[in-house]
């Protein structure tokens, strides 16, 4: 059964879009070789619609017009194959890792379960959102490595945890082009149109 994700109390309906925005620069030399580079900066961008009821429409309207210039948080929607609570508790980082690292060892401790490849995660000491590039299996091993994209933005230590499922929060701004209002259909259902969010980095 698919997980229902909420935005300002209203159910997010499919389809929704998740985009990784990482500007790259292309240059073609006179010998027709292509050189490509990136500044190493990345953010996640989401676009979706919601359906409101008579109990959520007020919060939807207020959410579209209040605190527009402030960063807010919501549970990050997961891809269908990654939904659910895969761990009984958020596991600890095994040792210290510096910013720029793309693989982090995670300690089993009291944690059990497998986190699927493609799961969105955060770390407890900063709000950057990452996606796992391999399965993290903590069913038997004392510790296991998980690849992440993008590279760590902030250093982590063994006192920090890997935040998953409902503990994985997206810190975002509403896109400046969002319509600030609510559309009603048949006087019962209402929606705010397409809502676009950009990760606060």
Image (cartoon, grey):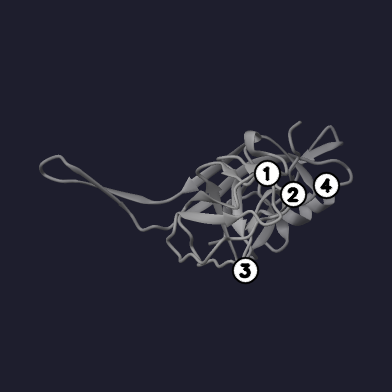
Q: Is residue 68 above or below residue 21?
A: below
Secondary structure at badge 2 equals loop
Report the residue at 50% width, 54% height from top.
43
Secondary structure at badge 4 equals helix
The answer to the question of whether label 1 and label 4 lie on touching residues, with beta carbons closer than 8 A, is no
The answer to the question of whether label 3 and label 2 lie on touching residues, with beta carbons closer than 8 A, is no
User: Badge 2, how many Cα within 10 Å: few under 14, some, many 20+?
Assistant: few
Which of 37/67 is in front?
37
The answer to the question of whether label 1 and label 2 lie on touching residues, with beta carbons closer than 8 A, is yes
Q: Position of residue 187 (x, y in %)?
A: 86, 36
Q: Earlier in the sequence, mark 3 or mark 2?
A: 2
The quarter of the picture where the N terminus appears is top right
Q: CA distance from mark 1 to mark 2?
A: 7 Å
Q: CA distance from mark 4 to mark 2?
A: 34 Å
Q: CA distance from mark 3 to mark 2?
A: 18 Å
User: Badge 1, how many Cα within 10 Å: few under 14, some, many 20+?
Assistant: some
Marker disc for residue 113 = 1
Q: CA distance from mark 1 to mark 4?
A: 38 Å
Q: Position of residue 2 (x, y in %)?
A: 73, 33
Q: Which residue is mark 2?
A: 88
Q: Earlier in the sequence, mark 3 or mark 1?
A: 1
Q: Earlier in the sequence, mark 4 or mark 3?
A: 4
Q: Nearer the viewer, mark 4 or mark 2?
A: 2
Report the residue at 73% width, 61% height from top.
66
Which of 91/25 is in front?
91
Q: Which residue is mark 4?
A: 57
Q: Which residue is mark 3?
A: 159
Secondary structure at badge 3 equals loop
């Amino acid at each position: 059964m698919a997980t229902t994700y909420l935005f300002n109390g209203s159910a997010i309906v499919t389809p929704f879009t998740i985009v990784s925005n990482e500007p790259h620069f292309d240059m073609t030399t006179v010998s027709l070789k292509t050189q490509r580079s990136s500044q190493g900066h990345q953010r996640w961008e989401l676009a979706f619609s919601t359906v409101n009821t008579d109990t959520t429409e007020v919060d939807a309207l207020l959410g579209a017009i209040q605190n527009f210039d402030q960063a807010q948080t919501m549970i990050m929607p997961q891809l269908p194959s990654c939904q659910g609570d895969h761990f009984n508790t958020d596991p600890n980082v095994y040792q210290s890792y510096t910013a720029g690292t793309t693989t982090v060892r995670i300690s089993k401790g009291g944690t059990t379960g497998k986190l699927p490849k493609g799961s969105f995660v955060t770390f407890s000491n900063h709000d950057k959102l990452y996606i796992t590039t391999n399965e993290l299996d903590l069913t038997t091993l004392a510790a296991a490595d998980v690849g992440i994209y993008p590279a760590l933005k902030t250093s982590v230590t063994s006192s920090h945890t890997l935040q998953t499922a409902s503990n994985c929060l997206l810190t975002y701004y509403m896109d400046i082009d969002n319509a600030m209002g609510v559309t009603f259909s048949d006087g019962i259902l209402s929606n705010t149109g397409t809502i676009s969010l950009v990760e606060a980095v």
